[in-house]
Amino acid sequence: MPSSSFSLGRRALLASAALPLIARAAGYPSKPVKVIVPYVPGGGADILARYMAQMLTGALGQPVIVDNRSGAGGMIGVDAGLAAPADGSVLTLISSSYTVNPSLYRIKYDPVRDITPIGQISAGPLLVVVSPASPIRSIADLVAAAKSRPGQLTYASSGQGSALHLAAAQFARRAGVQMVHVPYKGGGAALTDVMSGQVDVYFAATASALPHVEGGRLRALAVTTADRIPSLPEVPTIAQSGFPGYDVTLWYGLIGPKGLPADIVRRVNGEIATILRLGATTEKFKADGAVPAGGTPEAFGQRIASEIATWREVVGALNIKID
């Protein structure tokens, strides 16, 4: 009997301890949710964030507002997001570039321990694009042009140290060519100058470049992933263009500050999973050259940690330094 009484008492205690969590999950969110996008408006991250914000507004029952805070390779926005209260009122959209920054900058936070992973949203390739007026019509042409004009061919990026920068630098190293890096403060300005021929080539986020390819304002030479994409089935991969094994994926996901309660993480992750299963989302992502990702917060955290280690090796091998 004493044992039974203790067991019942212990269960009651555990149940009462869980009540605040249940109440908090049921009451979240009680006010608008801000999603910080650490990149400029109009780029791939912004396009994705605004779609997800619209869908999450309906799912969560509170306005979900996008707040663009660009600069310093995305670190300004991430700093702001991680400094926010750990109550789910401020979340941060990150991209693959988040895992590059620790190899290039002195960051104020531990990129693994000072965050709460919520979930990956999408994954897709970069598009290698040139002006439609350019004589470069393939990856082979790009390599030949770079070799005939060593140190003169230019490539754009959305910023020094971005995943887009490293994808192009990694390709140049594989191809044995020297190209001049022209960093921009965001993808929109880079696209404009590539379209006009001011810069020769750009490894661009598919979501922002694809409409211009379809509209004839850009020419796509290749995609950076191992497989072609349904929206541009005629465009080969870089691996198929003479560089087997080349594979760079651009992904996006949501994180929160360290200490974000597990019940809030589960709620947001669950709503993201529901949104990603919608046919409308699949079609939207397909139109942007991406696929829904999803998965658990734990798996997303493992991907972040793994890619930080991978990019550290790549940055070291390429000897890339930020001025």
Image (cartoon, rainbow, N blue to C red):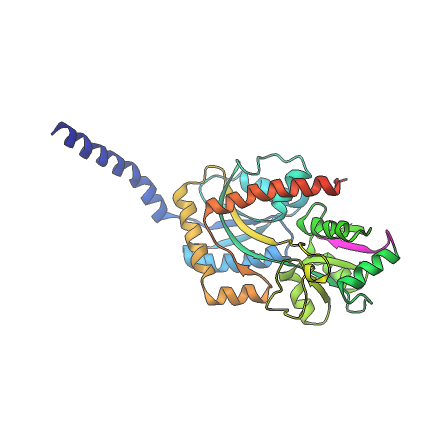
Q: How many marks?
A: 0
Residues 29 and 286: in front is 286
Residue 28 percent location from the top left of the image: 39, 48
Residues drawn in magenta: 150-157
Residue 282 seen? yes
Whether residue 91 is visible here, answered yes or no, is no
Q: Which of 321 and 249 is in front in this view?
A: 249
Q: Is residue 231 left or right of residue 90?
A: right
Identified at 63% across, 47% down, the residue is 97
Q: Residue at x 69, y 68 (%)?
A: 213
Question: Is the N terminus in the top left, top right, bottom left or bottom right quadrant?
Answer: top left
Q: Which residue is rendered at x = 44% and y = 51% of the image?
A: 269
13 sits left or right of 245 in the view? left
Measured from the top left, where is residue 52 in percent x and y? Answer: 51, 58
Residue at the farthest left position = 1
Choose between 254 and 34: the one closer to the eye: 254
Q: Please tell me whether residue 46 is drawn above or below residue 7 in the rendered image.
A: below
| Magenta stretch holds residue 94 | no
For residue 188, which quarter of the picture?
A: bottom right
Q: Position of residue 256 (x, y in %)?
A: 50, 43
Q: Residue at x 73, y 67 (%)?
A: 219
Q: Quadrant of residue 278?
A: bottom left
Q: Where is residue 124 shown, x and y percent of the image?
A: 59, 58
Image quadrant for the C terminus? top right
